[in-house]
């Protein structure tokens, strides 16, 4: 009986149409194990908190290589205690830290010849935010711009992003003023498991600018480290990632967040059907 069972198992794993699915399943199980282990051990450390970010992007291709995107995002964090707008779930109170929407326009250039696989893009975006509803909901605005360089092969994608990020204007107050802005440098590496599945890591470091600081005095004060799993099919893509978000100098005053990020992106149809959302 054992021999027959082993024979059947060997035949199953040798079937070519099963092997790609088994690899994807094993990758998903390994990623889930890493996520669960990271959260379980890290959240016991001092000043560590979980968070959930959910976003849904719509992207429209425009003439001459331009792309327009609209991305609403919901960010939820644990509340210190019960309050208005808080929700009891999973043994603790949660509340909406922010609800935001980004509107971005991007232009991309692709290399050719000896620079095949290289691409460069510029992006400008505005962000409308309803933040801190427990303290009184009020709109805030931010704008940012990106310069991105990416190198692609059949299996690997290496990217660098430089972002200038203007901080919040609080239009709910009478003395609205901009806070210190940031230059953010992000390195990312992605490995394509198949045509539809990808796994990647990234490091994002923030350098404050403004407030009289010179370039020599621009020490990084914030960092985000991420590991993620992505899936794409036709015009729809999904990604799930875990991000460790923390301040570098005042860690005692600012909580470290372990963020579960879930995102979906739809590329709308071109031409007259571009406004139709896919099923």
Image (cartoon, rainbow, N blue to C red):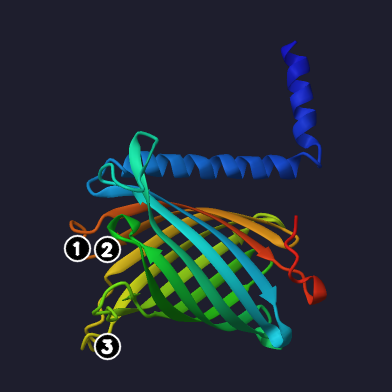
- Can residue 16 be spotted in the picture? yes
Q: Which mark is residue 99?
A: none
Q: CA distance from mark 1 to mark 3?
A: 21 Å
Q: Of discs 1 and 3, which sits in the foreground?
A: 1
Query: Is 239 in front, or is 272?
Result: 272
Element type where label 1 sits in the image: loop
Q: Which mark is residue 215?
A: 3
User: Which comes sooner in the sequence, label 1 or label 3?
Assistant: 3
Residue located 71% across and 88% down the image: 64
Give the residue displayed 69% in from the left and 59% down from the top: 236
SS for callout 2: strand
Determine which residue is flagged by label 1.
250
Within 10 angstroms of label 3, few (less than 14), some, or many (20 or more) residues? few
Callout 1 environment at 10 Å: few (<14), some (14 to 19), or many (20+)?
Answer: few
Q: CA distance from mark 2 to mark 1?
A: 6 Å
Residue that label 2 marks: 247
Q: Is residue 143 left or right of residue 25?
A: left
Residue 210 lies, in percent from the top left, at 27, 85
Q: Quadrant of residue 274?
A: bottom right
Q: Nearer the viewer, residue 4 or 265?
A: 265
Q: What quarter of the picture does the C terminus occupy? A: bottom right
The image position of residue 171, as x and y in percent, is: 33, 75
| Residue 225 left/right relative to 251 | right
Left or right, residue 276 beside residue 257: right
**215 or 167: which is nearer to us?**
167
Q: Quadrant of residue 172?
A: bottom left
Give the mark, 2 or 3, whose residue is nearer the N terminus.
Answer: 3
């Amino acid at each position: 009986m054992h021999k027959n069972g082993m024979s059947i198992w060997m035949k199953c794993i040798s079937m070519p149409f099963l092997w790609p699915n088994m690899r994807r399943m094993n990758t998903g199980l390994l990623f889930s194990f890493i996520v669960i282990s990271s959260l379980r051990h890290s959240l016991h450390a001092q000043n560590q908190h979980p968070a959930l970010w959910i976003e849904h992007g719509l992207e429209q291709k425009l003439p001459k290589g331009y792309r327009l995107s609209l991305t609403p995002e919901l960010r939820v964090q644990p509340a210190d205690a019960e309050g208005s707008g808080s929700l009891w779930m999973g043994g603790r109170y949660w509340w909406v830290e922010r609800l935001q929407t980004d509107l971005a326009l991007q232009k991309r250039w692709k290399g050719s010849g000896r620079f095949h696989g290289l691409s460069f893009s510029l992006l400008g975006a505005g962000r409308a935010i309803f933040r801190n509803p427990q303290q009184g909901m009020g709109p805030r605005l931010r704008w940012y711009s990106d310069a991105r360089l990416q190198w692609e092969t059949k299996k690997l994608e290496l990217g660098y992003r430089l972002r200038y990020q203007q901080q919040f204007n609080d239009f709910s107050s009478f003395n609205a003023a901009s806070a210190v802005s940031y230059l953010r440098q992000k390195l990312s590496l992605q490995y394509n498991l198949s045509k539809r599945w990808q796994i990647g890591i990234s490091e994002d470091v923030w350098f404050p600018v403004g407030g009289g600081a010179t370039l020599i005095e621009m020490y990084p004060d914030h960092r985000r480290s991420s590991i993620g799993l992505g899936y794409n099919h036709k015009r729809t893509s999904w990604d799930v990632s875990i991000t460790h978000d923390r301040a570098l100098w005042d860690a005692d005053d600012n909580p470290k967040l372990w963020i579960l990020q879930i995102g979906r992106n739809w590329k709308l149809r071109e031409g007259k059907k571009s406004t139709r959302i896919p099923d």
